[in-house]
Amino acid sequence: MFDNFILGVIVISSLKLVVDTYFDEEPSTYSAGSQQFLAFLDILDLLFNMIFILELSLKVISYGTRA
């Protein structure tokens, strides 16, 4: 179940990267709504990073440093 959750997070994170690539222009040219959306994407990026760091930590604790 944990692996399926992480796989889902990886897929959603990949889709977020697609959206980031679409908005890869100068942020000052966007409307206020688009800038709020970009801020939301930044929060999602932080959330994904925290989930992946938690996954790494849990796996290192459970498996040890040697596989």
Image: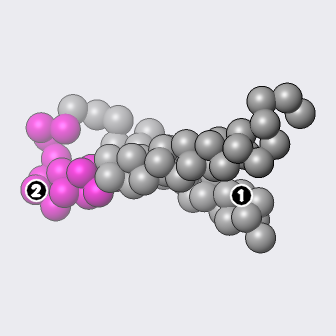
Does 25 sit left or right of 48 as displayed?
A: left
Mark 2: few, some, or many residues within 10 Å (few <14, many ≥20)? Answer: few
Is 37 colored magenta in this rendering? yes
Residue 24 is labelled as none
Front residue of this view, candidates 12 and 5:
5
Mark 1 or 2, which is nearer the eye?
Answer: 1
Tell me the amino acid under the disc marked 1: Leu
Question: Is any part of residue 18 visible from this angle?
Answer: no
Above or below — where is 53 with respect to 35?
above
Q: Position of residue 27 (x, y in %)?
A: 19, 38
**Residue named by callout 2:** 32
Query: Label 1, label 2: how many angstroms apart (C-alpha)?
Result: 33 Å
Give above or below for 30 relative to 5.
above
Region in magenta: 27-41
Q: Position of residue 13 (x, y in %)?
A: 55, 51
- Residue 66 part of the magenta segment: no
Residue under numbered circle 1? 7
